[in-house]
Amino acid sequence: MNIWVLSGCSSGLGRCWTDSIIRDRGEPVIGITRSDNAAIAMLEEYKDLFVPCIADVRDSFTLSEKLHQAVKEVGKPTRVVTAAGFAQFGTLEDLSSEQIREQFKTNVEGTLNVIRPLIPMMREGEASRILLVSSMSGVACWPLLGAYQISKYAIEAIADTLRLELQDFGIQVGCIEPGPHKTGWATTYARRQETRSEYNKQDLVSRSSCGYTINDPAASLPFFWKMFDSSVMPKRMATSPEFVDFAIKEAQEKIRDWRSAHVD
């Protein structure tokens, strides 16, 4: 039986995945959330299979302490998923350095704050896996999402680096790149900075919409489980077929750019 640690467990994709782990696999989840109310509700729903870790992923000291306490209660983790994050909207000109730092504190530092205390425990086990949650915004860019995209490109780099550093310990690392899902990512949980008048705001908003199908969170489950059920963990996986076609086209254009720059 696997023991899971999952940040961002109380909403969005994190909640969907937590529910599937517990209901479909009957495996325990140490769920990281900032919300006492959410933790209480999930305890009532999932009983002993949910172990709350009430902490802010930005607070590395408190998070590490509480993770160690939870591990003593349920056992050493073999599966780690970092789903905590939010989106900051605004042009890079309009966003302050503090707003960009806040984006990084949660999405990038928060991801590392979850993983680092757990690596020594996972080294002692067998067949451990870490899934970092990137985004299609970690592969391609749209206007008004610069801070978020920079943070998700960093998640891609973290995944690739961890994979190289942990390969001798049998810890596999993968990166999932969700497309649009009905999670409140761009509404309920988003932060927005007003765009200055020099920009054509309507045009930027129009171009920031990818136009892809917005799926229910449950549509991500086949991709999520493939990351863990495949004999070798995929390095990366996007949940939107529409985006895969776009990403391949973008990659081919980059290859042409690199090659053309070195042609005399």
Image (tube, helix red, strand yellow):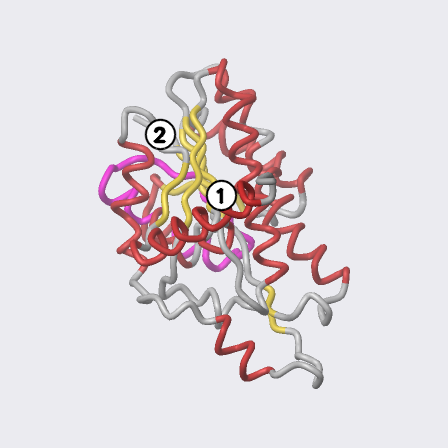
Percent x, y for residue 120? 56, 20
From the image, tell me which residue sits under label 2. Answer: 233
Name which residue type carries label 2. Met
Q: Residue at x 54, y 47 (%)?
A: 257
Tell me the tag on residue 255. 1
**Along the line of sight, the residue nearer the viewer: 240 or 11:** 240
Q: Is residue 40 left or right of residue 117?
A: left
* CA–CA distance in space, label 2 to label 1: 26 Å
Percent x, y for residue 235? 41, 33
Cβ–Cβ below 8 Å for labels 2 and 1?
Answer: no
Q: Residue furthest front?
A: 264
Tell me the tag on residue 48. none
Instruction: Tell me if residue 104 comes above or below residue 116 in the rendering.
Output: below
**Quadrant where the image shows the C terminus:** top right
259 in magenta: no
Q: Secondary structure at mark 2?
A: loop
Q: Residue at x 61, y 45 (%)?
A: 110
Q: Residue at x 54, y 81 (%)?
A: 203
Which of disc 1 and disc 2 is earlier in sequence? 2
Q: Is residue 224 left or right of residue 123?
A: left
**Is residue 182 in sight in this rendering?**
yes
Q: Nearer the viewer, mark 2 or mark 1?
A: 1
**Along the line of sight, the residue nearer the viewer: 35 or 179:** 179
* Main secondary structure found in the magenta portion: helix
Res 129 quadrant in image: top left
Q: Secondary structure at mark 1?
A: helix
Name which residue type carries label 1. Ile
30 in magenta: yes
Res 214 quadrant in image: bottom left
Q: Which residues are magenta?
A: 18-42
Percent x, y for residue 101? 72, 55
